[in-house]
Image (cartoon, helix red, strand yellow):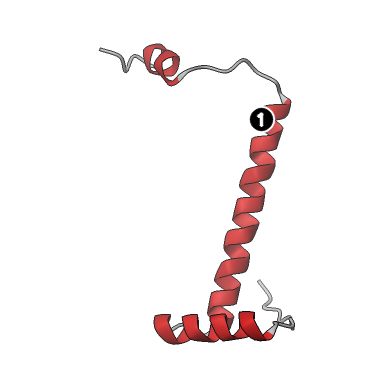
Amino acid sequence: MIARSITIELGLELNQELDRASGETGHSMAELAREAIEEWLEDREDAQEALAILARNEPARSSDEVRKRLGLER
């Protein structure tokens, strides 16, 4: 994978918070920003998958029904 750099403008408050978090964690501001972007992209993908499941309009099942179906009920 080819590494690519981007430049983003942070407001003063966000910059200060990121700088503070960097000092507290020992991670660079770039590392924290990269991690935040990765987590946001994962959350976005999860949300898209959830919407696709909801769009199928399948009947809902209770957790009790699922446990019985899987043989987990005693």
Q: Position of residue 45 (x, y in %)?
A: 65, 49
Query: Which residue corresponds to mark 1?
Result: 53
Q: Residue at x 43, y 21 (%)?
A: 63
The image quarter in which residue 71 lies? top left
Q: Quadrant of the C terminus?
A: top left
Rendered location of residue 18, percent (x, y): 55, 81
Residue drawn at the location 69% of the way across and 36% of the way down: 51
Q: Position of residue 42 (x, y in %)?
A: 60, 54
Answer with left or right where residue 71 lies relative to residue 18.
left
16, 8: nearer the viewer? 16
The correct choice, above or below, for 63 with respect to 4 in the image is: above
Q: Position of residue 37 (x, y in %)?
A: 63, 67
- Give the quadrant of residue 73: top left
How many residues crowd mark 1 within 10 Å: few (<14), some (14–19), many (20+)? few
Q: Is residue 6 above or below residue 57?
A: below
Residue most toward the left? 74
- Three-letter code, disc 1: Ile
Residue for point 58% across, 68% down:
36
Where disc 1 sits, the SS reads: helix
- Please state which of residues 56 and 21 is positioned toward the viewer in this rendering: 21
Q: Residue at x 52, y 17 (%)?
A: 61
The quarter of the image holding the N terminus is bottom right
- The answer to whether 3 is drawn above or below residue 41 in the figure is below
